[in-house]
Amino acid sequence: MNNALSDTYDDRVIIPDAQMNLFGLEPKDIIARQPAMPGVFFDAPDIELDYDIAVVCMSGGKDSLAALKYLLDRGFPASRIELWHHLVDGQEAAESFMDWPFIDDYCVKLAESLNMPLYFSWLKHGFKGEMLKHNSRSHSHMVGTPDGIVELTREAAKEATRRKFPQQAASLQTRWCSSALKIDVGRRAVTCQERFIDKKVLFVTGERREESSNRAKYNQLEPHSTDTVRKSAKPLKPRHVDAWRPVLHLSEEEVWQMLCDWRINPPVPYRLGWGRSSCQTCIFNGDRIWATIAHYWPERAQAISQYEEEFGTAISRNGKTVIERAAMAEPLDIDDELALRQASRNEYELPIFVPENQPWILPAGAYSGLSAGAS
Ligand code: SF4
């Protein structure tokens, strides 16, 4: 299949098919009834790890770190693990709009310290580019590979207009950031690389059931949307890809214990008091988090609020802009000076692991429940 045909196939078949799965629909609901797909397990905390490659989606938060550790603890060779990180803001703009400025470099330093390859992938022009889409097509997918960056164009995608923030909803149709900036990008990163053909691939992500009623319903092991061997008896590109959520059943306490035992430094957002490590200006941030952003990084809150006013639609369903919401709450009192300084920098400068002569300290945001991050 040449590149243009492959792009068309991905935009017309692979992505819509996977989106149907995300909305609880399957092709059988629309076309014809097929036997249930094999390989689906609601509970699968321990599986046979006979995979050629494990792709670990590394957001830089505690749960994806725990998912990686869980895999290592079960004896999967580190030499067959690669880390993938989706750049929410893309790589084209100099300044972060949604994500923490240091998070990309944190992933680089983490991968270096673990001696694992790291590949970035992103939607060109990132969150802001997709949000500002106006009678135009989505931008290209950009995929880091062992041979360099591949640009996958979107000729088959329909022209559309967004000009609003993703809505705070479980549906990925309206909460478009998760699907457009992460899930679709990750999917195409698999389908565009010939190196996954005739391989058994484990696609690892760090969701936990405790996080939300939506995630409570997730399967722990299932064929990934890019799997072809269970979709066809004779796939043109045979690819066995399983999606595994190894920490789906774990509590927050168990995750922190894993990170403590590993002596990995708690990621900066938790040290600042965030309950979850997601985009800094995540659409799910609560009023207290917006008050904190407006207090310590006023330009970040202003940038979001200006677009809410321009679009005439706020992120919050109550219609208040993030600046108005910030005024309704007290900012967190951040006393971790090192984390605070790191939060404004692009380069990650703190140690990845806690030095042996220092205690591992539970961060301020642990168990805080302060809302931030996708549900
Ligand atoms: S962290 Fe929040 S804003 Fe960022 S992609 Fe996820 S839901 Fe969207």
Image (tube, helix red, strand yellow):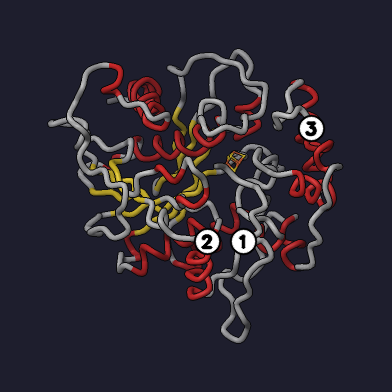
Q: Residue at x 79, y 51 (%)?
A: 292
- Secondary element at image label 1: loop
State the residue position of label 2.
252
Q: Earlier in the sequence, mark 3 or mark 2?
A: 2
Which numbered circle lies on residue 367?
1
> From the viewer's perspective, is the residue at label 3 or at label 2 nearer?
2
Q: Residue at x 21, y 33 (%)?
A: 36
Write the residue at 83% across / 38% down. 323
Q: Tell me, for residue 321, which label it has, or none.
A: 3
In the displayed structure, does residue 247 sit left or right of residue 299?
left
Few, some or many residues within 10 Å of mark 1 (<14, 14–19, 20+): some
* The residue positioned farthest toward the left in the image shown: 233
From mark 3 to mark 2, how far is it between C-alphas? 31 Å
- Asked if disc 2 and disc 1 are in contact, CB closer than 8 Å, the reply is yes
Can you say whether 145 is above or below 315 in the image? below
**Does the numbered disc 1 mark a residue whose Cβ is under 8 Å from ligand 1?**
no
Q: In the rendered image, is residue 46 in sight?
A: yes
Quarter containing ligand 1? top right
Which of the two discs, 1 and 3, sits closer to the camera?
1
Q: CA distance from mark 1 to mark 3?
A: 27 Å
